[in-house]
Image (cartoon, helix red, strand yellow):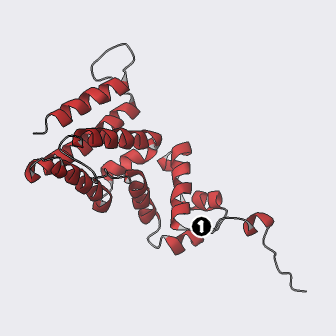
Amino acid sequence: MLMVRQPSINAQHRTPLSTERIIEAALRIVDGQGLGRLTMRRLGDALEVEAMAIYHHLPRGKEQLLDGLVVHVASGPAEAAGVTAANWRDVLRAWAADYRARLLAHAGVLPLLVTRRNPAALSTTVGSLREVLRRGGVADDTAAVAAHTLLGYVIGHAALEVRDTREDGADRPVDWDARFDAGLGLVIGGVR
């Protein structure tokens, strides 16, 4: 007698597998256990699917998964709509605060932002920052340099913050919020 395995009740009510669902599950693993613990098998277990099912959505496997994590965390470019010469600095401050918060919330992905060669993820961000600067009246050449500088500042600051680097040698706790705001003021204030 041939036995047909019936899908479990959980499987019948599970959200269908998608690239977004895979990336979000991978992000939960990285956030909870660290980047080194992210494997396709562990990801399959978290999604309650065979690891091979993931390859249907990510044919390049783990390489594509890591790129997807970078894009996911780096998403949320600065909105250029409505930017004027009066408010461009505020728009950049809001973007920087949001980006820093995402990097700190997903600190396990931070090394990927620095080491992965995925120009699409960061070029979109740089492009949107340049557009905010241009709409604010900043010359194109200066906007290009300022956009890269601002992105580098936020990523670098988040990396130091995650490591809790006390580069000033102080024995007291660092007020990372105050330090970030002060440095951001210097970067944005230096744009002419």
Disc 1 crowd rating (10 Å Cα; few below 14, some 14-19, many 20+) is some
Residue 81 placement, left or right of 106: left
Residue 188: percent from left, percent from top:
20, 36
Quadrant occupied by the N terminus = bottom right
Question: Which residue in the protein does label 1 denote?
Answer: 51
Residue type at mark 1: give it. Answer: Ala
Residue drawn at x 26%, y 58% is 123
Foreground residue, 162 or 78? 78
Q: Position of residue 79 (x, y in %)?
A: 31, 52
Task: Give the mark count.
Answer: 1
Q: Is 13 left or right of 51, judged from the image as shown?
A: right
Q: Is residue 49 left or right of residue 120?
A: right
For the point 55% across and 49% down, which residue is it? Answer: 28
Q: Is residue 72 above or below residue 3?
A: above
Residue 99 picture quarter: top left
Looking at the image, residue 51 lies above or below residue 82: below
The C terminus sits in image quarter: top left
Name the residue furthest top.
171
